[in-house]
Amino acid sequence: MDIFLKNKNFRKFTIAGWLSNAGNILFYLALMTYASRLQNYTLALSLITITEALPDLIQSISGYLADRTKNKYRVIVWLALLRFALYLLVGVLFVTNIAGWDLVLMVIGINFISDLSGMYSGGLQTPLIVDLVGKDEMAEAQGFSSGISQVITMVAQFVGSGLLLFMSYSGLAIINALTFLVAGLLFANITANVKKQQPQDQIAAVNEQNFFATITSSLKQVKRARGLLTIVLVIAMLNGLLSSVEPLISIVLAGNKGMLIGSFSFTLALINALIASGMALGSTLGTKFLKKASLFQIALLATLISSGMAGAILCKSTIAILILGVALGFAIGTASPKLTQWLVTSVDRQILSSSVGLLNTILVIAGPLMTTIFTGIAGAVGINYALSGILVLSLIVFAVTLKVMLNNTSKQTEAAEED
């Protein structure tokens, strides 16, 4: 919060991101609603979901391209204007004679191009934000930004569903376009400010290595930071466990009516909302109040909570699930910005976006992979086996994290004694 209030350029960066995110959520709901009315709506909804997820899987590539880009500020402005033009086009398409599958396929394609542009823009912004706030404040800055973004996402979903009652699909597409126009104007203003303050920033060094050399260099630097690679994998596992728990809870609730608070849909929505609220609190407050806590300590706490979460589901205790869901979300929400800050201080600036993209790719892949494994176990041999698997895996991750933390502490003590 302090950084947001005091740093004018970071504040504009953040507001631009929030606006774009809110607009995207509104349009995503509109597109999903339109597609749900098609005859083969299952295929349409699946295509939208897949194309929304694909850009997340290639963040290492978009990060690499961002590292090779000169004049990053100027490119960010043009990308925002490009997305503004794309959604204006979508708005026009919705009022033409094109309809049904032809319209949906065209809009999915445009939306996919926009998402790729957004991923590239995010990679461009990462090193610039580090320059604006400093390495030491990166966790708090990113935590506040992502925490509020999660809150905006939840609010935008309710607002979007309300707007669909009286606004057209074209109108929502144009609202989304306008959010990118405003974001582009904010980015342009930041560019002008930075040129006045730091003219040399526009000719900053860029990455000249090829893609595979960049990824190899990034991995080498991550490995040199003792324990960083392990903690990346630990947090990826935690994200995967959290992703796996949500569908398993649905299965348990469906078969145990006594666990419901009101209705099935309300209970599930309440659990998901509390987990999301915990993550938002962790990102905004956890990074500030647990600033001195090590990432290892937070990861240990998170693995214990995930074990308790699996146990609570096995015991069919809705209250325990709600409480532990908030706690697990808080721990993961606190850990993710701290992980980014550690990465920022461990790799060269020229390959920072590639490294962050690689990290995010690992984190993103873990979710669907582990969800597939545990829901597959639940379907094949039973829900209790899947939950037991989560419990055992959580304890294994806890043991590995504890061992690495103790080894690091021991080596740091030895190094201090030698000095």
Image: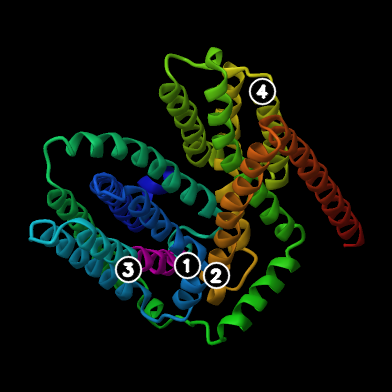
Image check: 310 left or right of 52?
A: right
Q: Are marks 2 and 4 in contact (CB under 8 Å)?
A: no
- Report which residue position mark 2 lands on: 352
At label 2, the amino acid type is Leu
Q: Residue at x 51, y 47 (%)?
A: 140
Q: Which mark is on residue 113?
A: 3
Asked which secondary structure carries label 3, the reply is helix
- Marked residue nearer the N-terminal end (4 or 1): 1
Image quarter where the C terminus lies is bottom right
Cα distance in 3D space between marks 1 and 2: 7 Å
Report which quarter residue 311 is drawn in: top right
Q: Which residue is mark 1?
A: 127
Q: Which mark is residue 312?
A: 4
In the depicted view, which residue is nearer to us: 85 or 369? 369
Please report the residue visible at 35 percent of the width from the left and 78 percent of the height from the top.
199
Cα distance in 3D space between marks 3 and 1: 23 Å
The boundaries of the magenta stretch are 115-128
Q: Quadrant of residue 124?
A: bottom left
